[in-house]
Amino acid sequence: MSEIAIYVDELSKLYHIGQTARFNTLRDRIIEGVHGLVRRNDKKGESATIWAIKDVSFQVNAGEVVGLIGRNGAGKSTLLKVLARITKPTGGRADIFGRVASLLEVGTGFHSELSGRENIFLSGAMLGMTQSEIKRKFDEIIAFSEIEEFLDTPVKRYSSGMYVRLAFAVAAHLEPEIMLVDEVLAVGDASFQAKCLGKMNDIVKQGRTVLFVSHNAERRI
């Protein structure tokens, strides 16, 4: 019997549309008061609910590559955010068995005020790697990302393409057991996309687990 890497059972996530969280600062109270005035004069301001995902169940065995295809707004990204522990589910369960690296939308995962170099070490530490393990992979990560010139620049100044190059390089080279990938390969030029797909093939051949979501049924890993 194959070992289970990802187990999802009746997983659901409910969002409240038009409802903001309550905070206790003076600025937040003023903003909340303005929102209240608008809502009293606009019935459309009343909150509604929407199920981003509802009663989803599946499992992925270790070493499998599984693609989830769906239109924009189908809940694919929400599912990955729950699996990556970025978002808490409303109901059900989602269990991950192994070290996880996630490549979600641009802007997720790195600290914007830190440099590219610092974010490589931060990401490695969050994956549970030692400093010596990260240093061993460091040169490969930089060579793959092709952003050596900007390595000590805060990533908030990176273009979206530069950001994704570094994010993919880190996730692919720090040897996670499970990779969660959300259409990140759609960003960047054609040559970099081909380079990423080649690296993903290498990862698959090493027996690691990949869960990939896309709206493009023609995408292949």
Image: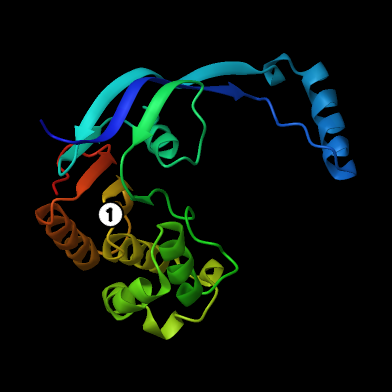
Which of the pair 133/82 is nearer the observer? 133
Which amino acid is tagged 1? Leu
Residue at position x 24%, y 28% in the image:
59
Secondary structure found at label 1:
helix
The correct choice, above or below, for 38 with respect to 103 in the image is: above
Residue at position x 45%, y 63% in the image:
125
Place of residue 17 in the rendered image (x, y in percent of width and height, measured from the top left): 60, 23
> Does the rendering let one see residue 160?
no
Q: Which residue is mark 1?
A: 185
Q: Residues within 10 Å of mark 1 (few under 14, many from 20)?
A: many
- Is 156 displayed left or right of 67 in the figure? right
- Is 80 displayed left or right of 57 in the figure? right
Place of residue 95 in the rendered image (x, y in percent of width and height, measured from the top left): 36, 32
Residue at position x 39%, y 37% in the image:
83
- Is 207 displayed left or right of 177 in the figure? left
Q: Residue furthest bottom?
A: 149
Place of residue 86 in the rendered image (x, y in percent of width and height, measured from the top left): 50, 41
Q: How is the image coloured?
A: rainbow
Place of residue 76 in the rendered image (x, y in percent of width and height, measured from the top left): 35, 33
The correct choice, above or below, for 47 with respect to 99 in the image is: above
Q: Quadrant of the image for the N terminus?
A: top left
> Does the rendering let one see residue 139?
yes
Rendering quarter of residue 148: bottom left
Which of the pair 128/74 is nearer the observer? 128
Labels in figure, total: 1
The correct choice, above or below, for 178 with respect to 131 in the image is: above
